[in-house]
Image (cartoon, rainbow, N blue to C red):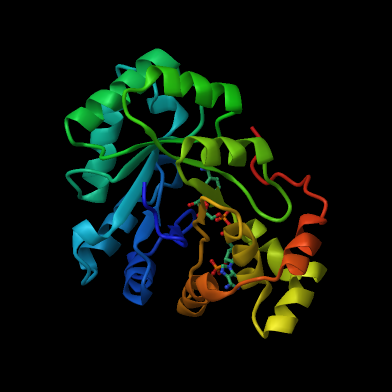
């Protein structure tokens, strides 16, 4: 899937004006989920914006209690109803647990794709062996894998899988949930570029091949700054410094 380098993470956004503002300043990929309880907010933002629906990539995720094969269609239809859309561009399995069963869950997702309710199938928070199994079962290609990936955490094996199999890794929590702003290495590099540690964190995430990201932001200033981070290029030495930060702080463990 051809995803924009920086999309909007919407977890915690409860005002459609923020979504509309994000689209207005240039975001074209919107990432929501059933569990964020804001699909209607995202749908309203899409409806209120001046940008054509077909120019936007709208992604949502089926929560673990909607993953039984018999529940996937009803759960997806409920999401579409809240979003006010006929189809989502990307429908993820949020986590491979709860009612997840590779055969029945993924077959149901293939059926939704065949029927046009979901244009692409994505996975999130999968382990390498679970990715392998999903590839065996799915008719659809894995369109994206969304995982936690930032200067304090990231699984290189999952990155290698994305690069080997040719799908984008969608890095979530690229600002370490806001902690990037207080990190001394990121702040130091930011000072040298006259930018923010948030931009440096996004640029580091984006320095990896086949990685796109979905920072969450609420204010127009933050929305713009994160989008502008697309044009920030870090030197090899700066990337090495960030690589050397201890990478053991997972914000969303299983
Ligand atoms: N698949 C999954 O299991 C999963 C799990 C977690 C997250 N996600 C996705 O990833 C998205 C992003 O992750 P996240 O929400 O955990 O955290 P994040 O994007 O790493 O950080 C968001 C925090 O950074 C602040 N911020 C944003 N831009 C800033 C800037 N330019 N300068 C200073 N502060 C800034 C935000 O504040 P303001 O809001 O005040 O701007 C917010 O407090 C989520 O919204 C969701 O879409 C997916």
Q: Position of residue 250 (x, y in %)?
A: 71, 44
Q: Looking at the rendering, in which quadrant would you find the C terminus?
A: top right
Q: Position of residue 43 (x, y in %)?
A: 27, 55
Which quadrant does ligand 1 occupy? Answer: bottom right
Determine the residue positioned at 60% across, 42% down: 159
Whether residue 69 is visible here, answered yes or no, is yes
Determine the residue positioned at 21% across, 72% down: 50
Foreground residue among 214 and 254: 214
Residue 227 to residue 61: above or below: below
Q: Residue furthest bottom?
A: 194
218 relative to 241 in the view: left or right: left
106 relative to 213 in the view: left or right: left
63 relative to 97 in the view: left or right: left
Q: How many numbered dots are placed on residues in this image? A: 0
The quarter of the displayed image where residue 126 is located: top right
Determine the residue positioned at 45% across, 41% down: 167
Whether residue 99 is visible here, answered yes or no, is no
Residue 195 to residue 226: above or below: below
Q: Position of residue 111 (x, y in %)?
A: 23, 24
């Amino acid at each position: 899937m051809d995803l924009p380098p920086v999309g909007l993470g919407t977890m915690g956004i409860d005002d459609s004006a923020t979504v509309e503002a994000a689209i207005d300043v240039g975001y074209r990929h919107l990432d929501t989920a059933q569990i964020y309880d804001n699909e209607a907010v995202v749908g309203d933002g899409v409806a209120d914006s001046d940008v054509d629906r077909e120019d936007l990539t709208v992604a949502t995720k089926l929560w673990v209690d909607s993953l039984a094969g018999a529940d996937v269609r009803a759960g997806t239809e409920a999401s579409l109803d809240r979003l006010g859309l006929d189809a989502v561009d990307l429908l993820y399995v949020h986590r491979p647990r709860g009612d997840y069963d590779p055969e029945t869950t993924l077959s149901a997702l293939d059926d939704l794709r065949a029927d046009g309710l979901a244009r692409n199938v994505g996975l999130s928070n999968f382990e390498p062996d679970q990715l392998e199994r999903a590839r065996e079962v799915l008719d659809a290609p894995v369109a994206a894998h969304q995982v936690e990936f930032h200067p304090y955490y990231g699984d290189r094996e999952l990155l290698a899988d994305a690069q080997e199999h040719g799908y984008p890794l969608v890095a979530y929590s690229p600002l370490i949930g806001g902690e990037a702003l207080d990190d001394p290495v990121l702040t130091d590099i930011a000072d040298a570029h006259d930018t923010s540690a948030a931009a440096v964190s996004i640029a580091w995430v984006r320095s990896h091949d086949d990685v796109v990201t979905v920072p969450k932001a609420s204010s127009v200033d933050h929305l713009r700054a994160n989008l502008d981070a697309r044009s920030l290029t870090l030197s090899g030495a700066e990337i090495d410094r960030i690589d050397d930060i201890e990478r053991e702080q997972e914000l969303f463990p299983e």
